[in-house]
Amino acid sequence: MCQGPLHEFLRRLPKCEHHVHIEGCLTPRLIFELAKRNNISLPDPKDNPAYASPEALDERYNHFTNLDDFLGFYFIGMSVLHNTSDFEDLAWEYFQHAHADGVHHAEVFFDPQAHVNRGVSYNAVVAGLTAACQRAERLFGMTTKLILCFVKHLPVEDAKKLYSQAQASGHFTSGMVHGIGCSSTEVGPPKDMFREIYASAKSKGIPLTAHAGEEGDSTYIRAALEIGAQRIDHGIKITQDPELMKKVAREGIMLTVCPLSNVRLCCFEKVEQVPIRAFLDAGIRFSINSDDPAYFKAFILQNYCAVQEAFDLTVDEWRTISENSVKGSWVNDARKSELLRLIDEHVKKYEY
Ligand code: ADE
Ligand code: ZN
């Protein structure tokens, strides 16, 4: 945790989180607990010693070598989620952490393809997550949105089937599921893998985001924008393309940056290399997020603190980051005004 003079300022700063995978909130402790309760086997420790105990798994998480190395653990971890109540408990744990870290608005990814493939019903997943969202709204006054994330390592036909199911369930029209994203392995699958789904969703006014430019180069970001993404998750490789930086700044496209994730997954050696200063200088809108807090051992506040330690930002620069993260949120104008007012009230206490 940062020791700097702005720590208390950062802790109390009203935050929006736009990039957190709910399955990335599954701690080793909960993985082992749910595996036992749901009678689901984890890999044999003889084949993979990381699964000898929650402690061994936690230790292995200190040594991810790249995105795909992490994803191997991430998709095994989520295989223990079975009942609606598992999803509710998991999301509720996240919301409690987020609330403690000063999150007022949270947009949460979930990966239903990985659950449906194991025989868990799509409706069971959404029901559990929705129950936790409603609880967070009721008890914490948080606003929440669910973002259905398609995954790039599974067949696109599976994604299309799931998209049809989500449409048929009426979740997009009811608002139970707010938007669409895509994630998982980046380099390898076609950059425009979800072109048809994105075109259909765009025609229906469903908000779209996409993971791009995390391990892949800046052409992945161009491809994501070209198929209709309105936000970019990560987007750190955009500095390779100055023209694209200008376009993203001009059009107010938000990048949802996850600094500690980038270090844990070896995109950068240290937070100082995340292009936070370049984004501020270029007028690029971005938010700071946790991505997979149980795997990277850091929730949103630790990411804010890590950025502060690396870049020694001013209160005014934090005001800009916070206001931009509200402007890039998928909430109505009344809620945006309320969040901006909360930020203004907070920042004024620290301005001289
Ligand atoms: N799924 C969960 N975390 C991810 C990440 N950092 N990149 C791509 N897909 C993910
Ligand atoms: Zn992510």
Image (cartoon, grey):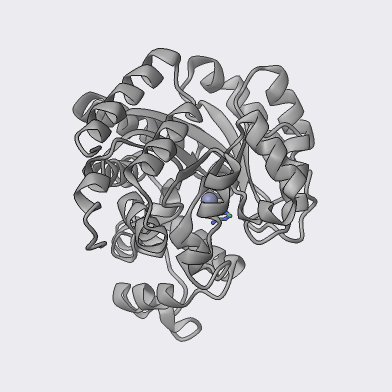
Most distant residue in the top direction: 334
Does 77 sit above or below residue 104?
A: below
Query: Which residue does the image show at 55% across and 68% down from the upper left?
Result: 268
The x and y percentages for residue 89 are: 29, 44
Residue at image coords 70%, 40%: 246
Residue 81 visible in the current orientation: yes
Give the residue displayed 24% in from the left and 43% down from the top: 96
In percent of width and height, residue 166 lies at 59, 27
Outermost residue to the front: 352
Which of the two residues, 4 or 15, is positioned nearer the viewer here?
4
Compared with 328, 30 (above or below) is below
- Give the x, y percent position of residue 287: 47, 42
Exactly how many numbered labels are in the figure? 0
Q: Quadrant of ligand 1?
A: bottom right
Instruction: Give the quadrant of residue 340.
Output: top left
Q: Position of residue 201 (x, y in %)?
A: 68, 25
Q: Residue furthest bottom?
A: 46
Q: Is residue 211 found left or right of 155 in the rendered image?
A: left
